[in-house]
């Protein structure tokens, strides 16, 4: 007989075998997501912090889990996985509905879906539980491509990261993601007590944050835009590229992207990777003009408080 159990602290070590399967699935079907919102939620090592796990147990063994953290109004899930292959859909459905019912009426955000499970099955389960699907594309630029020169937009100066920029970075994110498809994710992260995504990146050490290729654009004293680069081995990631709405339409985003790709030429990186919202047509067209290629789709699942949902 299956039962639900909340694990936290040292109890999270019980997830060890399934965490390894999750990583194996990621290695086979796609890298750990390191995009702008999930960089601070990827669980490489369970340290017994403020994360909890909703575990589905049978005969003392964990058959599925959701790792999550809660805020006053929101729940952020960084990882979900189910094992037992012959009934994975049923197990996932049980976990999703149980977590939703536990925390109703809070908003709930799920990151990447299960890496080695059919995405269409997962989408149907989340939709039946009242979730909205946010689709984004993974795009890739090969270091072998030439980069056409882009004219520097007038009126801007460019700086590297320093700690005295932290307050401006937070305010830029707040302005840039207002009315954006990812706004509910941003709000949920803040509510659950996670560091703002861009701050989490710049506060990382050099094994993750690529300071030399990240850049901050100023118009006078105002932070007008920024590009945040991270890296995994020989792969460079543009984890975030944001422009203040007041400064859009001036070629700033295009120039920030150009600066990264030009700087990449003198580095050892073989390719540059990014994630972009499927609804962000302007950004999609810009990346395609720079010869970024679509590689695969990625998904987030967002349940908003107040949406009509079906009972399980």
Image (tube, rainbow, N blue to C red):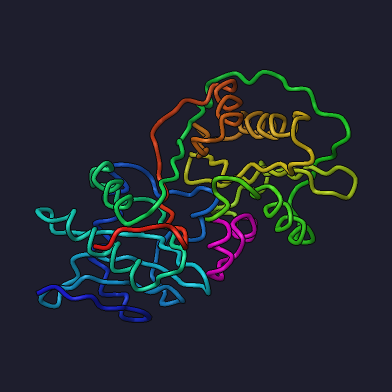
Write down the region rendered in magenta.
Answer: 185-203
Image check: 298 left or right of 227?
left
Image check: 221 left or right of 244?
right
Residue at 44% x, 70% y is 69
The quadrant the C terminus occupies is bottom left
Residue furthest toward the front?
308
Residue 223 in picture, x, y percent from top left: 80, 48
Within the magenta stretch, is there residue 296?
no
Does residue 68 sit above or below 25 in this rendering? Answer: below
Image check: 68 left or right of 215?
left
Residue at 48% x, 49% y is 34
Residue at 29% x, 64% y is 97
Residue 9 in picture, x, y percent from top left: 38, 81
Residue at 60% x, 45% y is 180
In depth, the one of 260 and 218 nearer the eye is 218
In depth, the one of 116 and 192 nearer the eye is 192
Quadrant assignment, res 58: bottom left
Image check: 46 left or right of 40?
left
């Amino acid at each position: 007989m299956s039962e639900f159990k909340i694990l936290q602290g040292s109890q999270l070590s019980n997830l060890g075998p399934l965490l390894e399967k999750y990583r194996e699935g990621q290695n086979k079907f796609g890298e750990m997501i390191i995009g702008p919102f999930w960089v601070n939620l990827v669980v490489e090592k369970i340290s017994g912090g403020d994360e909890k796990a909703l575990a589905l147990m049978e005969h003392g063994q964990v058959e599925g889990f959701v790792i999550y953290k809660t805020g006053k109004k929101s729940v952020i899930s960084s990882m979900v996985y189910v094992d037992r292959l012959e009934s994975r859909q049923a197990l996932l459905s049980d976990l999703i509905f149980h977590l939703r019912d536990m925390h109703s009426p809070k908003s709930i955000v799920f990151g990447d879906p299960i890496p080695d499970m059919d995405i269409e099955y997962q989408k149907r389960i989340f939709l039946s539980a009242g979730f909205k699907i946010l689709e984004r594309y993974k795009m890739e630029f090969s270091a072998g491509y030439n980069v056409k020169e882009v004219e520097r937009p007038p009126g801007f100066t460019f700086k590297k990261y320093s700690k005295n920029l932290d307050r401006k970075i937070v305010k830029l994110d707040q302005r840039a993601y207002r009315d954006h498809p990812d706004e509910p994710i941003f709000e949920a992260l803040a509510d659950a007590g996670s560091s703002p995504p861009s701050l989490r990146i710049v506060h990382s050490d050099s094994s993750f944050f690529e300071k030399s290729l990240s850049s901050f654009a100023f118009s006078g004293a105002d932070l007008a835009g920024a590009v945040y680069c991270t890296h995994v081995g020989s792969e460079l990631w543009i984890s975030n590229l944001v422009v203040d709405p007041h400064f859009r339409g001036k070629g700033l985003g295009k120039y920030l992207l150009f600066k990264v790709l030009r700087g990449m030429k003198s580095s050892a990186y073989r390719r540059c990777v990014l994630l972009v919202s499927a609804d962000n047509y302007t950004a999609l067209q810009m990346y395609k003009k720079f010869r970024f290629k679509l590689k695969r789709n990625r998904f987030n699942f967002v349940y908003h408080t107040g949406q009509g949902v079906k009972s399980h």
